[in-house]
Amino acid sequence: MERKPLSWQWLAPTIVLAAIILGVDALLPLGVADGLLYVLVVLTAWPYPNDRRYPLWLAGIASLLLLVGYFLSPVGNADPWMILTNRVYSLLAIWAMAWMLDQAKSVRFVLETQAQELAVSERRFRALFNTMPSGVAVYEPWNDGEDFIIKELNCSGQRTSNPTQSAILGKKVTEVFPGIREFGLFAVFQEVHRSG
């Protein structure tokens, strides 16, 4: 999957949000746990591209803003240990969110890649299936091979079969071809089903 370049449509709201949070942080006295708001900056990376670096970059920026906010905030009545604890918890929350987004984006990338590969494989199968000169039908076992459901019929199979495709798809093979057991073909279906 290719990386998309940064766009202002994504970057501008992130910058505005970061500036608002920094402003709130600078207005509130130290000791108020407003540093957790910087997690929202990291979260803005979720809808953007599959590039896993964005959450980490934003976590770095949010951490820097958290530090800047510490120096800009007015001194409150909170104990120094409480101020430090709130800032450390905020840092942990920022980086935990960045790590979770990194993992989620990694999984999303793998799933999207697999879906694309599956679509390509499906197109190849369809092209081969529908252009074969021989008639081919795909059957699905019903009730552990007690009967078989007709799932697909290629173009050549449609030309050579008496019933139309719409009349046989989804039906049991014994309903569509009542003499299949006597002909001996049904036993072959069952053997293939059992042996794989």
Image (spheres, helix red, strand yellow):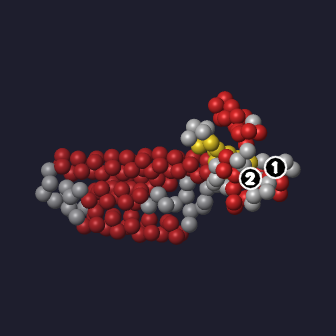
Q: Position of residue 91 (x, y in %)?
A: 33, 49
Identify the residue at horizontal 31%, vertical 59% (top origin). Answer: 37
Q: Position of residue 190 (x, y in %)?
A: 67, 35
Residue 155 visible, this orientation: no
In the rendered image of this protein, does residue 85 appear above or below residue 188? below
Identify the residue at horizontal 84%, vertical 48% (top origin). Answer: 134
Identify the residue at horizontal 57%, vertical 37% (top origin). Answer: 144
Circle 2 sits in a helix, a strand or a loop, which is it? strand
In the picture of the structure, the residue carrying the numbered disc 2 is 153
Viewer-closest of 64 and 140 = 140
Identify the residue at horizontal 73%, vertical 59% (top origin). Answer: 165
Q: Position of residue 162 (x, y in %)?
A: 79, 57
- Residue, far right: 133
Local crowd size for mark 2, using a 10 Å CA cut-off: few (<14), some (14–19), many (≥20): many
Viewer-closest of 189 and 95 = 189
- Relative to 80, 69 lies left or right: right
Q: Quadrant of residue 28?
A: bottom left
| Tags 2 and 1 touching, CB below 8 Å | yes
Q: Position of residue 4 (x, y in %)?
A: 61, 60
Disc assigned to residue 190? none
Q: Quadrant of residue 38?
A: bottom left
- Residue, far top: 195
The type of residue carrying mark 2 is Leu
In the picture of the structure, the residue carrying the numbered disc 1 is 135
The type of residue carrying mark 1 is Gly
